[in-house]
Amino acid sequence: MKGVRAFSLCQHGPFWIHLRLDKTRPWSLPRHSRFVIARSNATVTQKLDLTRAAVNNKPDIKAEDLAQAIRRGKTEINNKLQLSPVQKKVRELRQLTRQLQVVHPNVLAKALHRGLLFHNQELLAINKPYGVPVHGGPGVRNSISDVLPILAKMIDGMRAGPELHLCHRLDKETTGTMLLARSEMAASRVQELFRTHQVEKKYWVLSVGVPVPSEGVIDIPVVEKAISGPQPHYKMALSPVYRLSEGGEGVTRVRANQQAHGAVTHYRVLASSGGCSLVELRPITGVKHQIRVHMAYALGCTILGDHKYSHWNKLAPQKLPEGVLRKLGLEQSKARYLPLHLHASQLTLPGISGKGDITVQCPLPKFFTSSLRKLQIPLPEKR
């Protein structure tokens, strides 16, 4: 059997085609085709030599080198992006939050130990960081309750000290003063003080809008409601017991919702500028999300970074005025990264076991003071 091989180039690479000239078969190539094949062989051979030379001269590319080049490209792109100081602070905060959620429990306990605000033989107060939950749960790697045994050893040394117990809780996004007890008995006493509203709590918030009047008391019950729509979810809502009369000249009492909880909050504007304000709130009661609901729906001044209560019937990033975005150096598309500006600034407990009152204050986190500075809202003098 005789045959002719022809070289061909395609998108998958060069290959050879073997054409058989079998005398036993009734077919063969025409006479003029032999010249075409010979000419094609000469041309393709030249192309093959050039291709081989290019391949031989090309340096080897390793997977590691390629990955480093991609990382360098991403770094160069990130470096070209000009971030405002607020955007840098937000990025640092997000990175810190992720780190605290994935670090070893010893690291989180050490951070809490460094931020210790007060301690005696019965109680101690810590500065709760942003983004760390108080209790563990599905998907939670680190929580305040998980590291309490480690924190107790750091405070009392390596000797086996008393366990620490939670006296109350703060939301994951809330920062500030949090009380712990050294014994179950002390924790029970403090929890009873919270339950009977004997603990004076002060929170500072940075709100979008200025409450009118500048000081007052909000006494509107709060109830949890199911929100239907494209994104079904639950959120707390107002459940007022009074409504405007038909003529709008007065108010009439309505039947109270049996599922609602009484919620009373005293508020006072400390400073304001550019359509935003620093507000001090003293919740008399302790209903879930009470401060956030009263600020958003009773006063119409949503807390900066409160994406849950910025809209009623949907879950979406907070919509900020153009002037606020300009001062913060943000675009609306980046507003979703703003943290909740809600800080437990002070707690005052009445005397326990014949002792005097205990007052614990906690400084504002850096992202909070940075936002105040950008919005040109001055901090009040020492309280």
Image (spheres, rainbow, N blue to C red):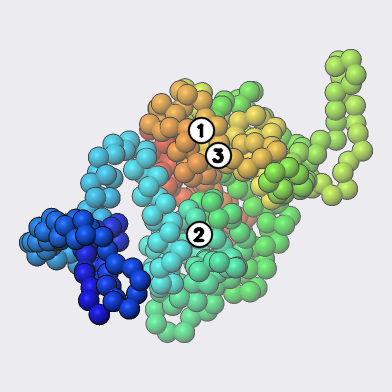
Q: Which mark is residue 61?
A: none
Q: Judge left or right: residue 285 versus residue 155.
A: right
Q: Where does residue 217 sit, x and y in percent of width and height?
A: 70, 33
Question: Which of marks 3 and 1 precedes in the sequence?
Answer: 1
Residue wearing tag 2: 132
Q: Is residue 298 visible?
A: yes
As helix, strand or loop, the secondary structure at mark 3 comes to loop
Q: Earlier in the sequence, mark 3 or mark 2?
A: 2
Q: Nearer the viewer, mark 1 or mark 3?
A: 3
Label 1 Cα crowd, 10 Å radius (few <14 / some 14-19 / many 20+): many
Residue tagged 3? 317
Relative depth, front residue between 98 and 8: 8
Question: What amino acid is at disc 3?
Answer: Pro
Q: CA distance from mark 1 to mark 3?
A: 21 Å
Q: Is residue 75 above or below residue 26?
A: above
Describe residue 39's horizontal placement relative to residue 213 as left or right.
left
Instruction: Look at mark 1 in the image and give the residue it sits on.
Output: 278
Q: Give the secondary structure at mark 2.
A: loop
Is 187 drawn above or below residue 356 in the view shown? below
Q: In the current view of this chain or complex, which residue is farthest to the bottom?
A: 160
Question: Which residue is found at the position 50% from the left and 76% from the top?
Answer: 149
**Rendered-image quadrant of the N terminus:** bottom left
